[in-house]
Image (cartoon, grey):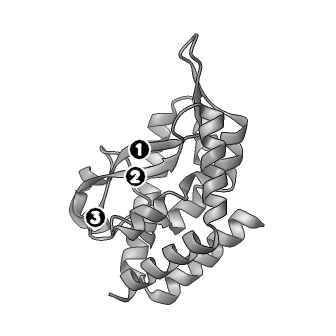
């Protein structure tokens, strides 16, 4: 109950005091991608229930060739995690929490077995220890000969272990520590 109350207060605070950042980021995404600026994607939520995650669109699709690439503005939005700001709405409606395992695509958390399924008892979060450790996941995967294999054999199992550690040791002050680490990472 305390965690849900904190999630609501935190989300409202960020939205109220930094609404202009959300608005400017969204406008940049609209102009840059020539779309509505919002990206919806199915992710696995608490208890393995799928939900739609909100993000700012950072990919431009060439109308002539159909090629998709991260735009310059998209790199900026991703670099400062501004593309994640719409997830505050996911938090407000109760699909996510501020701190918890990052919501993954179908085919990962929903397929966990045994003790690892405890992760699904948690609401997915905006930030986590695993998200901080793998903040450069895209760059790590780009360097691999077989990125999907590296993700499935190295990164994903480590994320599962980090998220299980969070499950076993979660606390209000632990969440505050993760939030402060996230702020430090983004701005410093």
**Residues under numbered marks 2 and 1 in contact, where contact means CB atoms less than 8 Å apart:** yes
The kind of secondary structure element at disc 3 is helix
Q: Which residue is mark 2?
A: 53
Q: Position of residue 21 (x, y in %)?
A: 66, 60
Residue lying farthest right? Answer: 188
Judging depth in this view, the residue of 6 and 158 nearest the camera is 6
Q: Which residue is mark 3?
A: 46
- Can you tell which quarter of the image residue 96 is in? bottom left
Residue that appears at 34% across and 67% down: 93
Residue that appears at 40% across and 70% down: 92
Q: Quadrant of the C terminus?
A: bottom right
The kind of secondary structure element at disc 1 is strand
Examine the rendered structure and indicate whether residue 27 appears above or below residue 123.
above
Q: Nearer the viewer, mark 3 or mark 1?
A: 1
Residue that appears at 55% across and 69% down: 15
Does residue 50 appear left or right of residue 97 in this picture? left
Disc 3 residue crowd, few under 14, some 14–19, many 20+, Cα 10 Å: some
Does residue 13 appear left or right of residue 125 in this picture? right
Q: Position of residue 24 (x, y in %)?
A: 67, 53
């Amino acid at each position: 109950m305390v965690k849900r109350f904190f999630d609501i207060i935190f989300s409202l605070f960020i939205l109220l005091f930094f609404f202009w950042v959300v608005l400017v980021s969204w406008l940049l995404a609209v102009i840059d991608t020539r779309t509505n600026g919002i990206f919806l994607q199915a992710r696995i939520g608490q208890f393995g229930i799928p939900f739609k995650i909100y993000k700012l669109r950072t990919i431009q699709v060439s109308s002539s060739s159909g090629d998709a690439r991260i735009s310059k503005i998209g790199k900026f939005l991703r670099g400062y995690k501004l593309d994640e700001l719409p997830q505050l709405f996911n938090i407000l409606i109760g699909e996510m929490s501020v701190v918890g395992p990052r919501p993954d695509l179908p085919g990962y958390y929903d397929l966990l077995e045994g003790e690892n399924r405890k992760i699904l008892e948690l609401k997915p979060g905006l930030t986590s220890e695993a998200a901080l450790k793998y903040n450069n996941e895209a760059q790590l995967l780009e360097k691999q000969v077989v990125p999907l294999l590296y993700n499935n054999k190295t990164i994903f199992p480590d994320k599962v272990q980090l998220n299980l550690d969070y499950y076993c040791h979660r606390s209000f002050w632990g969440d505050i520590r993760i939030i402060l680490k996230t702020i430090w990472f983004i701005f410093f």
